[in-house]
Image (cartoon, rainbow, N blue to C red):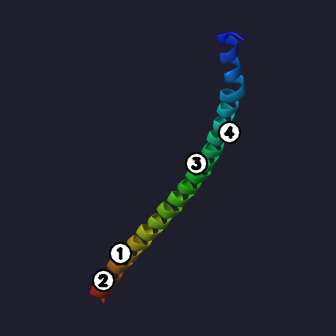
Amino acid sequence: MSVIEDSRKVLQDFIAPELRAISARLDALEKRFDDGERRAERRHDEVMNSIRQVIDWSSVQQRLARLESKDGAHQ
């Protein structure tokens, strides 16, 4: 066999299957990363909604306290 044929055989026998295996592992990692990213986005949205609710509730309480204080001052 010539050097070129030997090189080609090494590429076909060893490197090509290894590259396919690496590619498959990368695909699996990308899927896991995408699932984790979606989960993180959902959690972020939930936290932001909770914060908005607390802010809204706090605002309502402050407004109510002001109204009650005005009502008490008028009586």
Give the Cα distance between marks 4 and 3. 14 Å
- Which numbered disc flags the more N-terminal residue, 4 or 1? 4
For numbered disc 2, what is the local secondary structure? helix
Q: In this rendering, would 69 be left or right of 47?
A: left
Q: Which is more foreground, mark 3 or mark 2? A: 3
Mark 1 surroundings within 10 Å by alpha-carbon count, few (fewer than 14), some (14 through 19), many (20 or more): few
The secondary element bearing badge 4 is classed as: helix
| Residue 12: percent from left, percent from top | 71, 23
Along the line of sight, the residue nearer the viewer: 60 or 26: 26
For marks 1 and 2 on the same chain, the one whose residue lies earlier in the sequence: 1
Q: Nearer the viewer, mark 1 or mark 3?
A: 3
> In the rendered image, which residue does mark 3 sit on?
33
Label whose residue precedes the other's in the sequence (4 or 3): 4
Query: Of marks 1 and 3, which one's residue comes earlier in the chain?
Result: 3
Residue drawn at the location 35% of the way across and 83% of the way down: 68
Q: Are marks 1 and 3 in contact (CB under 8 Å)?
A: no
Q: Residues within 10 Å of mark 3 (few under 14, many from 20)?
A: few
Residue type pointed to by label 1: Gln
